[in-house]
Amino acid sequence: MVDNRYATALVIACVLSILATVYLSVAVGTQHWYQYSSPTVRGEGNISDLRALYDEFMVGEFDEKTYSDTLFRLNGTVGLWWRCVLVPANAPWYKDPDVKLECRNFNLPQQFTPKYKEPGNHNSGEDMLRTYLWRCQFLLPLVSLGLVVLAGLTGFCACLCRSLTPTLGIGVLHLLAGLCTLATVCCYLAGMDLLHRVSMLPDKVDGSLGWSLYLALISSPLHMMAAALLVWAARSHSQNYYRMTAYRVA
């Protein structure tokens, strides 16, 4: 028999866990982690340069400097798996007020591509810190989602067995998931800061955090709050159970 307090804590923890998982899933699947605001395109020569950058961005080989320069100058957004630019929907560019979002994904080999001390210059040597920050930022959210799935399966089995025994373990899994999500955001912010140190933003180009990153940031404390409720319910139920057992023995 489960006390009403524990049942309420478990229900709230489940709601928090579901919200956190949805937020994190949306954040991982969208590209608005970081966004650039570029000045309006003016002049035929400038337009030609931007079209060349755009064509290289869409069909060229994967190169960090090329896609970074395109993001800087075409109101780009970049996430964990996507990089996108805003371009006029139709030619000519200087006459069309309508814009469309064009995206390319980072495939798995590209996620493991080394980062260099000078982006685009393969002879400058690998930048180990940026390389591993990039790899952590896309691996850690997958680990976080995997931990939540494992916690959900464990909780489902516990419900079938009508047991609160695994609740402590489920809480620990949620705590680890929250820490992984928080580490993802930290790695992403550190990686972007290091990128901007080696690739200076052009004049009148501003960068800002996007809503996808904030969703991931919100999901971390939600997972931790769910973990706290689960751990509290498990510990309190265990203490009451031992007290009742001791009372019956006495």
Image (cartoon, helix red, strand yellow):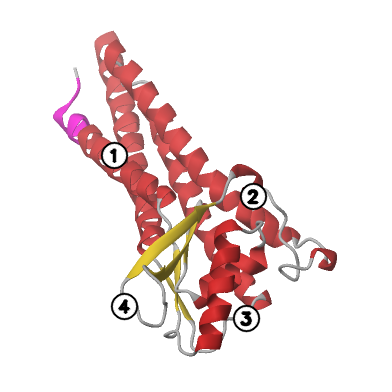
Residue 141 drawn at (x, y percent): 49, 45
Nearer the viewer's eye, disc 2 or disc 3?
A: 2
Residue 71 in the image: x percent, y percent?
52, 70
Write down the region rendered in magenta: 2-8
Q: What residue is shown with label 3?
A: 200
Q: Is residue 15 left or right of 128 when viewed as pictured?
A: left
Residue for point 35% across, 63% down? 211
Question: What residue is rendered at 21% in x and 34% in y?
Answer: 11
Type of amino acid under label 1: Ile
Q: Does the magenta stretch include residue 87?
A: no
Three-letter residue code for mark 2 = Gln
Q: Distance between the residues labelled 3 and 4?
A: 28 Å
Residue 28 to residue 193: above or below? above
Residue 110's tag is 2
Answer with mark 4 or mark 2, whichever residue precedes in sequence.
4
Q: How far apart are marks 1 and 3 (CA)?
A: 40 Å
Q: Alpha-carbon distance for marks 2 and 1? A: 31 Å
59 displayed left or right of 12:
right
Q: Which tag, 1 or 3, sits closer to the chain's start?
A: 1
Residue pointed to by mark 1: 18
SS for callout 2: helix
Q: Distance between the residues labelled 4 and 2?
A: 33 Å
Name, please, the residue furthest toward the right. Answer: 123
Q: Earlier in the sequence, mark 1 or mark 4?
A: 1
